[in-house]
Amino acid sequence: MRFSTEESLDISIIMPCLNEINTVGLCVDEALSYIRSKGLRGEVIVADNGSTDGSAVLAKQHGAYVVNVSPIGYGNAIINGISYSGGKVIVIGDCDTTYDFSDLDSFYEPLSEGAFDVVIGDRFSGGIEKGAMPLSHKLGVRFLSACGRNRFKTDVRDFHSGLRGLTRNAALKIECTHGGMEFATEMIACAAMSGLKIGQTPIKLRKCQYERKSKLKTIRDGIRHLSYIYNTKRP
């Protein structure tokens, strides 16, 4: 990740977005509420990845700064979103109401205080609401996380968590290049191989408040994660 070394804010909250008009406004409101309640200097950046449903316009109306990102890809959205950020602490989270942006203390505090360089949310220890994650994804995430732990010598339990944070300095050190879903694994792998301090915090995975079709492709994305894990050269 390469971006300006200038930091002017306490926190930047990055939300990758692709056609989330039913939920992005709620998530932006939660995030801004957190920033205000803590008296922080902060921003919410919605990295819009080609939405055609008006998500970008709605996000801006709710107070987010919108970055238009092309080409489409989860990693592309996050990498580009971070490149526009100005926070000392950066929190990344999906804008589909499955994560609670109104309470980010367990990310912001240890990162701002220097206890960790990266903090990953752990859905398995925090709790998964009924219907929030299909069984195939639960099994897949557990399996791929075990592979990642073994390969990159880290104890991270949830490699695919959609809520995570890192310091600005850590973002400068991590060289993530994958534009797809495997970015989630790559970020943790790069942090571990760079010797960064990685913390974990329990988070609850909520069921999306609106009926929606998952953007995840279980088999395809699983193979891409597995390929990254075993084809990446360790230093």
Image: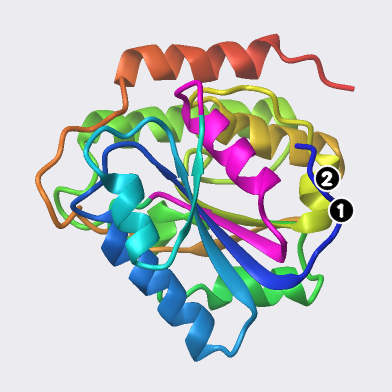
In magenta, the rendered stretch is 70-94
Is 17 colored magenta in this rendering?
A: no
- Residue position for label 2: 172
Are the residues tagged 2 and 1 within 8 Å (C-beta)?
yes
Question: Could you tell me which secondary element the residue under label 2 belongs to?
Answer: helix
x and y percent of residue 25 in the render? 29, 61
Question: Could you tell me which secondary element the residue under label 1 belongs to?
Answer: loop
In the displayed structure image, the side of residue 31 where residue 82 appears, left or right: right
Label annotation for residue 5: 1
Q: What amino acid type is highlighted by mark number 2?
A: Leu
Is 75 colored magenta in this rendering?
A: yes
Q: Is residue 98 in view?
A: no
x and y percent of residue 54 in the render? 25, 44
Quadrant of the rendering where the C terminus is positioned: top right
Q: Is residue 94 above or below residue 63?
A: above
The total number of labels drawn is 2
x and y percent of residue 163 in the render? 48, 54
